Amino acid sequence: MTMPRLWTLAGIVVSLSLSPASSRATVVGIEFTGLLDFVEPGLPFSDATHVGDVFRGTYSYDTSAMDTLPDNSSLGAYRFPDSALSVEFGPFGISTAGFGITVYNVHSPLVDRYSVFASSGVSAFDLLWRELGFTLADTTGTAFTSDALPLGPPDLQDFQFERVFLLTQAGARDPSLRGTVTSLATFPEPATFSLVAIGALYTLKRKRPVGIRPPNAH
């Protein structure tokens, strides 16, 4: 790739990182991964999805979202109707048209919970699903100090009691997929990505082969 094209690419990256949609510092993206420990037989994805398979999911939200239960000091409920919760398992994937986050900071009994779940019914594989998401639970009551929306992914080490992922059909009591969440991580910020890209392009320019001079060089 020629240097003019490289610097054009750098300009595009900078423009994306500075655009209004990507420069909102309050938006955080989170990826979660885990291992499946139950797959219901007889469903469209059952033959190609197995116990022990890795599942991966993503969601993003504005950390300035308001608590929809402001009078309840033990339960924070936050809704994100314009954001998606997406999960891949095996060769399949499913995505919601919105989701919610709840934060339980309960003092009696001492159980703290963090739940990310589908906020409405989801249609996929010609079936309707009422629940897609995961819950983390801490029975020591020390994971949270309030019901405020976390500014990033919770620390899994704070949730030793439960880290369960579920996909449940509408009308069913038991889940069709169940797994254990093993990691939570924040997406790289767009601005960070642009700095890395520009740094790489600058390095390429510095490593121009000896004996090749730019046009009009003397």
Image (cartoon, grey):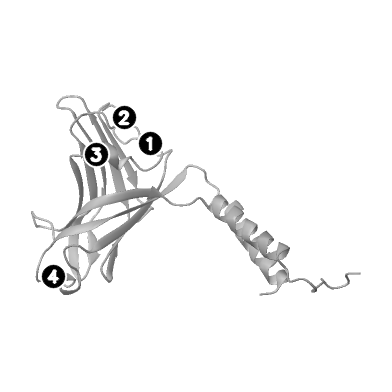
Q: CA distance from mark 2 to mark 4?
A: 40 Å
Q: CA distance from mark 2 to mark 1?
A: 8 Å
Q: Which residue is mark 1?
A: 66
Q: Nearer the viewer, residue 218 or 107?
A: 218
- Residue 211, compared with residue 188, is above or below; it is below
Q: CA distance from mark 2 to mark 3?
A: 25 Å
For the residues carrying marks 4 and 3, which lies nearer the camera in this image?
Answer: 3
- Describe the element under mark 1 as helix, strand or loop: loop
Residue 200 x %, y %: 62, 60
Q: Which residue is mark 3?
A: 159
- In the rendered structure, which amino acid carries the disc numbered 4? Leu
- In the rendered structure, which amino acid carries the disc numbered 1? Met
- Residue 154, compared with residue 4, is above or below; it is above
Q: CA distance from mark 1 to mark 4?
A: 38 Å
The mark found on residue 43 in the picture is 4
Inspect this view and state whether residue 119 appears.
Answer: no
In the image: residue 84, left or right of residue 177:
right
Q: Which residue is found at the position 72% from the left and 62% from the top?
A: 206
- Mark 1–mark 4 contact, CB under 8 Å? no
